[in-house]
Structures are given as structure tokens and as C-alpha cells.
Image (cartoon, rainbow, N blue to C red):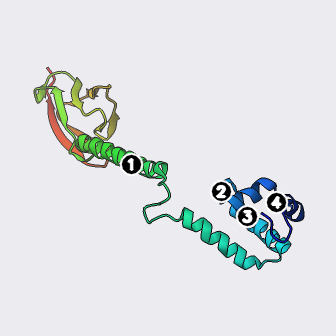
Amino acid sequence: MNTRGINLERLTYATGVPNRFLSALLNGEYDRLPGPPYVRGYLIKIAAALDFNPDALLQSYKDSVYKIKASGGEDLMPRNRFADYSSKKNILIIAVVGFLIVGYLAFRLNDVFGVPDLSITYPASDIVTLGELRVQGEINPGDKLTLNSEVIYTDEGGRFEKEVSLDPGLNTLEFVVTRFLGRETRVIKQIFYQPE
């Protein structure tokens, strides 16, 4: 390069642009240049030192660079595969949790919404000769049982046992089994106590 008596070393001294970048500009090795803001600043300094129009020099540079670097419509930024994976993963987790909840509710539907069961195993007869009666039976373990408005507690399997004092004559035993959401089964058993 020798424009108006200026060589590469003098231009480096006059502009402060490193020699390697001036050499890259002259040889068209644009991949060896720093980022566009630096190159723009270098070109303005070179234009001032050589008394050129800076806009014309910048446009010439852009035309040269973009002719080389121009790409087609297929040149797209890569997709963020992690962002897609994260949203798909969240949707999958929500779907699996929803499926498990629906499955559990369907399996436990009768326990929550159904009519409670009551099985009284003793006394089998409606006539007794003893004043003390041991009432036995079974309900669903999650249900609540009352006998004549008194709460009867069950074991883990839902079995219950209760001593009841009878008066001579007809005695009424009212069993009420209540489910979680308030559905109930009511059984009235009449026992006739006939002392010996």
C-alpha cells in the first residue's frame, strides 16, 4: 500500500489501528477482524488519515463483507432445544400427575361417594334371655359408626364390638354408618329381652 506516500507502518502510526488489522483489511481477510463496532471505528480513522469520505469507505467495506457473508433463508439461528424440552417435560409431568389423581379417585370412588355398608354378625336372634348383650359387626374402616347416638370405634379392619344393657321387653338399637361426604346407612334392630 502506498497512497500519497503512506505505507502500512505510517498508517498504523497515524491511525492507531494495529498493523495486523490493517493488513487483514487490505487483503480481504475479514474473518481476522474484530467485531463490527471496532472495524467501523478503524475505517473512520483510516478515512480521516487518507482524507477520504468515511461514508464511502464504510459502504465499500459493507459491500465487500456482505457479499462474502450473505446467506440464504435457510441460514437460521439454532433452536433452543432445552426450552422445548423443558416445556414438553412440564406438560408430561402435569399429564401423568393428572392421570394418577383421576385413577386414584376412580379406584376410591365408592369409598368417598358410595353408600356405606353395615354387617351385624351378633346377635343373630331378635329374642335374648340375658340383660347384657354384646353387639358385633363390621363396617368399612373409613366410615363412622354410632349406636343409639353413641360413637362406636372400630379396629383397622372395620370390625366393632359393644356391650349393651337391655331393659326387659322390646329394645331398639339404631345403627348409623356415615361416609366421608355425609352419605349414611341407617339400620334399626329390635331386640326383645325376655328374662328367664
| Structural distance between the alpha carbons of marks 1 and 2 | 53 Å
User: What amino acid is labelled 1 in the image?
Assistant: Ile
| Between discs 1 and 4, the one toward the N terminus | 4
Q: Nearer the viewer, mark 1 or mark 3?
A: 3
Mark number for residue 171?
Answer: none
Q: Is residue 34 visible?
A: no
Pick whichever of labels 1 and 2 is earlier in the sequence. Answer: 2
Q: Nearer the viewer, mark 1 or mark 4?
A: 4
Residue 3 horizontal/vertical position (percent): 80, 69
Sequence-wise, the earlier of marks 1 and 3 is 3
Compared across the picture, whether 53 is left or right of 82 comes to right
Q: Identify which residue is drawn at 24% across, 46% down.
A: 184
Identified by mark 4, the residue type is Leu
Which residue is disc 1 drawn over? 94
Helix, strand or loop for disc 3 = helix
First-in-chain label (4 vs 2): 4
Tell me if residue 99 comes above or below residue 44 in the rendering: above
Residues at discs 4 and 2 in contact (Cβ within 8 Å): no
Circle 2 packing at 10 Å, graded few (<14), some (14-19), many (20+), is few
Between residue 11 and residue 67, name the one nearer to us.
11
- Dot 3 or dot 4: first in sequence order is 4
Q: Secondary structure at mark 1?
A: helix
Q: Which residue is mark 4?
A: 8
Q: Residue at x 69, y 64 (%)?
A: 36
In the image, 142 versus 80, the foreground residue is: 80
- Amino acid at the residue labelled 2: Glu
Pointer 3 residue: 39
Mark 1 vs mark 2, foreground winner is 2
Mark 3: amino acid: Val
> Counting other residues with Cα less than 10 Å from the Cα at mark 1, is it few (<14), some (14-19), or many (20 or more)?
few
Name the disc covering residue 29, or none: 2
